[in-house]
Each structure stands twice: as structure tokens, then as C-alpha cells.
Image (cartoon, helix red, strand yellow):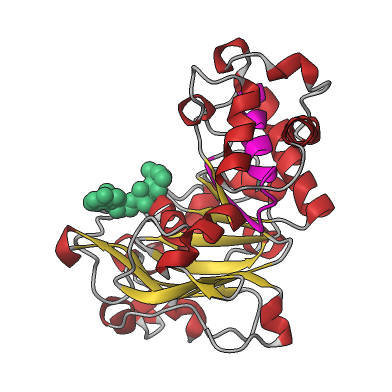
């Protein structure tokens, strides 16, 4: 990356035209994604199963090689060999299932201390561990140190994971469906905990979710993915209250908490990243095209024939749709 401008200094992660492919290029799981996340910002990445959310965040942590494009974390390009250890500290990942992420034979103390040792975090280890647990709401920490994962509830286990991550003072948390495996009753608590680290420590979060309600609760911005591409992005309020892309509208129309939208069940084939449709990739399932409205208004040919990316970054709320771009 070139020298950081003052504005760029507050960008924690910057994705530029990122493509991730599988099967020797036959599967374009992430297909030209550009996104900047600011310091202390929470971005929810939403979209149906298989749209490339996990692949995108794995790419940010250097687990998926890029076919094209680039990713920079705090100004350093991801993939530059020696920097990987530093990156692994500054970017922490929180998974859906806290049980799978904890070694069942390691005590809670060990679970938090391990990362401190790997990353050679300076300080008195027992104090750092206790502080991390307390900050994650496990109080008093002494009560948890010698316990094992199976002796905790799912919510407590997720708090341990978050404590272990936050103990490393990351700039960015990547959370892949962080509350999907938890009881509905404790999802809000865990989201509030994550949000508290944004406010108290300025951490940034990219939270992957199927659940638009989660996005509503925690995110400053929402990015909607469809078949490997971000098709709409903007401030949470704007995207969820006035979605512009027909795909976002369809996603929102089936959320029970959101009233006053006619349910739109998407028709057509489920999307397959090994066969991305020509034109707008959503056009085979788009209600604006299927209803004939796109043709009546004279842009149907573009929907079927002209691929498009997000509008240029002039407005905060941007969309990739011929109907909106007219
Ligand atoms: N290692 C891999 N090899 C081949 N294809 C893969 C691989 N990993 C992911 N894919 C494919 O890439 C696409 C995107 O997958 P990804 O796991 O990123 O989706 P997702 O949005 O996280 O879905 P979900 O909501 O179900 O977790 C899918 O079609 C998936 O089958
Ligand atoms: Mg996933």
C-alpha cells in the first residue's frame, strides 16, 4: 500500500477488488469485493448460504490465497510472509461454535494464556488472563480459571473465546456467525459484549451473519453479499429501512420483525458460484426482471447482459443494480 493518508490511517482493513477462487478458478467464491472498515466500526456481512462470507473473512486473515486484488490490514498487505504472525495478533477470529474452538483438555486459564504465549504478549500472565476473563464478563475470574470447557455453558464458552481474542489487543475481530449456535436468550448478551469492546477499546468488527436482526443490533454498516459480490452496502438504518437492491428487499421481506413488507420468495435456481449468470448475477431471480418491469422501463437488456459492481464511493449507501443506477 502507498503511504497512508490521514483518512487511510483510520482504515483498519481495506479490501480492493478481492477475488478468491476454488477448483482451479472454476468456482468464484468471492468475486471482486472492495470494502474499507474503519477503526471502531462494526460491519455486518449478510447473505444466504454459500455467497462467500466465510471465504471472504478467511481471506482477510490470510487463510485463502487471492486470485486477484489485495487486502491491507492497518496498511500492511496480507500475504506478505513474515508479517503473518503480526497479522494473526491484530486480527482475531471468533467462530460460530465455541466448543469446537476450545481444546476440551485445556483449562480456561490455558485457553486464554496460550495466545498470550504464542504472541509473546508482555505482562504478568496470570494478571492478563484474569483481566481478560473479567472484561469478557466472567467474574470473578478466579471462579473460572481452573474449569474446563465442558463445565461452562455455551454462552460462557463464547465469552472465553472472546476473552482470549481480546487479550491480544486486536484491531479487528472477524466473527463468523458468533451467536448462531447459542440460545436465543443469550445472543443479545454476547452481541452487547462484543459491542462493548468497540466502544471501550476501539476494536473493529466484521460480523458474518444470516440474521438481519443481529445486524440491526450490532452493526454500524451492513454489506449484503450475493454470489461472491457485495451488492449493497450502507449505514445499517438506511439499508434495513430503505433497501435499494431487490435482493436485499427480498432478504428483508422474510424477516418477521420487519413489518409492512410484502413477502417476496425468491424464485429460480439457488446460486452456484461455479456458474455465475451473465449480466447482473441476480437477474435470473430478480423480481424486477421476472415481472417484466425491467423491460417495460427499458433496462431489461442491461440486467441480462451487463455485469455491474457497486456504485462508486460517492454516497455511503451504495448498490449494484441497473434499476437503481438508471
Ligand atoms: N475449500 C473449498 N473448495 C471448494 N469450494 C469451496 C471451498 N470453500 C468454499 N467453497 C465454495 O465457495 C462458496 C462460498 O462458500 P462460503 O463458505 O464462503 O459461503 P458462506 O457465505 O460462508 O456460507 P454459509 O452461510 O453457509 O456459511 C460455496 O459455493 C462453497 O461451496
Ligand atoms: Mg460461512
Q: Is residue 181 left or right of residue 189?
A: left
**Rendered residue at 33%/77% (across/down):** 303
Foreground pick, 137 / 169: 169
Foreground pick, 315 / 218: 218
**Rendered residue at 50%/57% (across/down):** 85
Place of residue 202 in the rendered image (x, y in percent of width and height, measured from the top left): 77, 58
Q: Measured along the vertical axis of the image, is residue 158 above or below residue 254?
A: above
* Residue 17 seen by the camera: no
Residue 299 shown in magenta = no
**Rendered residue at 64%/85% (across/down):** 4
Q: Measured along the vertical axis of the image, is residue 195 above or below residue 206?
A: above
**Which residue is at the far top?**
151
Foreground pick, 269 / 70: 70
Residue 135 appears in which quarter of the rendering?
Answer: top right
Q: Is residue 258 left or right of residue 279?
A: right
* Residue 122 seen by the camera: yes
Residue 164 shown in magenta = yes
Ligand 2, image quadrant it occupies: top left
Q: Measured along the vertical axis of the image, is residue 96 above or below residue 20?
A: above
* Mark count: 0
Place of residue 134 in the rendered image (x, y in percent of width and height, measured from the top left): 80, 30
Residue 13 appears in which quarter of the rendering?
Answer: bottom right
Residue 161 appears in which quarter of the rendering?
Answer: top right
Place of residue 60 in the rendered image (x, y in percent of width and height, measured from the top left): 47, 61
**Rendered residue at 24%/68% (across/down):** 277
Place of residue 296 in the rendered image (x, y in percent of width and height, measured from the top left): 37, 80
- Magenta residues span 156-177
Q: Is residue 202 left or right of residue 13?
A: right
Q: Measured along the vertical axis of the image, is residue 14 above or below residue 24?
A: below
Amino acid at each position: 500500500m502507498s503511504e497512508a493518508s490521514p483518512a487511510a490511517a483510520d482504515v483498519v482493513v481495506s479490501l480492493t477488488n478481492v477475488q478468491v477462487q476454488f477448483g482451479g478458478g472454476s468456482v468464484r467464491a468471492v468475486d471482486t469485493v472492495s470494502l474499507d472498515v474503519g477503526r471502531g466500526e462494526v460491519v455486518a456481512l449478510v447473505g444466504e448460504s454459500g455467497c462467500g462470507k466465510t471465504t471472504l473473512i478467511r481471506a482477510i486473515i490470510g487463510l485463502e490465497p487471492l486470485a486477484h486484488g489485495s487486502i491491507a490490514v492497518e496498511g500492511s498487505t496480507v500475504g506478505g510472509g513474515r508479517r503473518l504472525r503480526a497479522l494473526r495478533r491484530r486480527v482475531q477470529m471468533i467462530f460460530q461454535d465455541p466448543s469446537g474452538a476450545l481444546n476440551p483438555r485445556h483449562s480456561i486459564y490455558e485457553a486464554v494464556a496460550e495466545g498470550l504465549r504464542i504472541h509473546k504478549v508482555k505482562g504478568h500472565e496470570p494478571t492478563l488472563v484474569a483481566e481478560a476473563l473479567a472484561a469478557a464478563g466472567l467474574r470473578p475470574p478466579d471462579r473460572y480459571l481452573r474449569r474446563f470447557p465442558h463445565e461452562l455453558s455455551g454462552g460462557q464458552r463464547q465469552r472465553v473465546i472472546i476473552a482470549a481474542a481480546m487479550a491480544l489487543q486486536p484491531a479487528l475481530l472477524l466473527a463468523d456467525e458468533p451467536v448462531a449456535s447459542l440460545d436465543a436468550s443469550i445472543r443479545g448478551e454476547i452481541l452487547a459484549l462484543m459491542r462493548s469492546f468497540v466502544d471501550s477499546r476501539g476494536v473493529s468488527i466484521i460480523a458474518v451473519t444470516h440474521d438481519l436482526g443481529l445486524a440491526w443490533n450490532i452493526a454500524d454498516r451492513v454489506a449484503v453479499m450475493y454470489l461472491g459480490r457485495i451488492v449493497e452496502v450502507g449505514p445499517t438504518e438506511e439499508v434495513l429501512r430503505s433497501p435499494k437492491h431487490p435482493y436485499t428487499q427480498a432478504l428483508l421481506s422474510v424477516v418477521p420483525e420487519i413489518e409492512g413488507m410484502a413477502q417476496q420468495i425468491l424464485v429460480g435456481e439457488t446460486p452456484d458460484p461455479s456458474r455465475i449468470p451473465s449480466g447482473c448475477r441476480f437477474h435470473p431471480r430478480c423480481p424486477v426482471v421476472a415481472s417484466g418491469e425491467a423491460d417495460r422501463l427499458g433496462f431489461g437488456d442491461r440486467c441480462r447482459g451487463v455485469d455491474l459492481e457497486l456504485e462508486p464511493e460517492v454516497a455511503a449507501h451504495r448498490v449494484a443494480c441497473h434499476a437503481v443506477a438508471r
